[in-house]
Image (cartoon, rainbow, N blue to C red):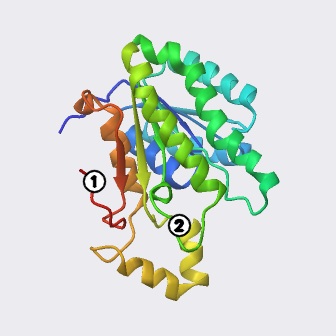
Amino acid sequence: MDLGLTGKKALVTGATKGLGRAITETLLEEGVSVAICARDAEGVETAVSELSSQGEVCGAAVDAGDLESLTGWINSSSEQLGGIDIYVHNTSGKPQRKLDGWINNFNIDLVSLVGGVGAAQEALADGGGSVISIGTTATAEHFASGSGSYSAFKAAVTNWTLGQAQVLGAQGIRCNVVSPGPIMVEGGDWDGIKQALPEFYEATQKTHPQGDLGLPEDVANAVAFLSSDAAKHINGVNLTVDGGFLKRVNF
């Protein structure tokens, strides 16, 4: 299927590694020009250098918890790329152990989404853009390990994004969510769990009907599809990418 992404311009936050990196690589493969950001300047520089052979890519160090920093990157990236067709919100703070720390998730997960989309809105509306937020299956049910601030603010991210399908949809901007289940990212959370808690990891594997966790490219492929012309009539959807990990039945 031709996704019709060639020549599009995308911004992907938190994109030097993990899901953001996989999303960037997939979009580049589809002919998209991509601007990336992350907090670590050295990591951004390395990622841009490694990805440049795959297509047009630029990047900058950004603290997603600082809205001025984020909007500055959005504006400069739009100018450098010549517009914005796709905005992928992928930044998220880690679960906070103390209530005082919840402000980190508020700023990094939620404020950066609302403010970032606001900064990109005019450019997105020019060509009928697409906003995709990365959610999580942890918003759909309680997990024994507990997720606290992480799942709470991811739920807010999901609610706000899907609501904007009506608001921004009227301007031609589709708004969808991709919610991964357990995904094996090299050096990521589940990789750490596999090393430290092998029995828990194996038990989680068994809860997947196909017997294993997903891979970053599974999430990236979903993002690419929802970003594309092939999904031009899909708006306000929370697409779960979990291999059947959740046991709910949606009607």
Residue type indicated by callout 1: Asn
Q: Provide residue 244's location: percent of width, then percent of height.
A: 31, 65
Q: Residues within 10 Å of mark 2 (few under 14, many from 20)?
A: few
| Residue 245, image quadrant | bottom left
Residue drawn at x 48%, y 48% is 135
Residue lying at 50% horizontally and 64% vertically, measured from the top left: 185
Question: Residue 51 placed where, x, y %?
Answer: 51, 43
Which one is closest to the eye, mark 2 or mark 1? 1
**In the rendered view, would you say 141 is above or below 3?**
below
Name the mark on residue 250: 1
Q: Secondary structure at mark 1?
A: loop
Q: Is residue 171 visible?
A: yes
Q: Quick check: 207 left or right of 17?
A: left
Q: Nearer the viewer, residue 49 or 1?
A: 1
Q: CA distance from mark 2 to mark 1?
A: 31 Å
Q: Residue at x 26, y 27 (%)?
A: 232
Mark 1 neighbour class, 10 Å CA radius: few under 14, some 14 to 19, many 20 or more: few
Say the numbered circle drawn on residue 60: none
- Residue 99's x, y, as percent? 78, 56
Above or below for 111 versus 49: above
Residue depicted at 63% across the width and 47% down the height: 46
| Residue 187 at least partly seen | no
Q: What kind of residue is marked 2?
A: Glu
- Write down the residue under mark 2: 186
Furthest residue in direction bottom, as rendered: 199
Q: Residue furthest right?
A: 100
Q: Residue furthest left?
A: 1
Query: Which sits earlier in the primary sequence, circle 2 or circle 1?
Result: 2
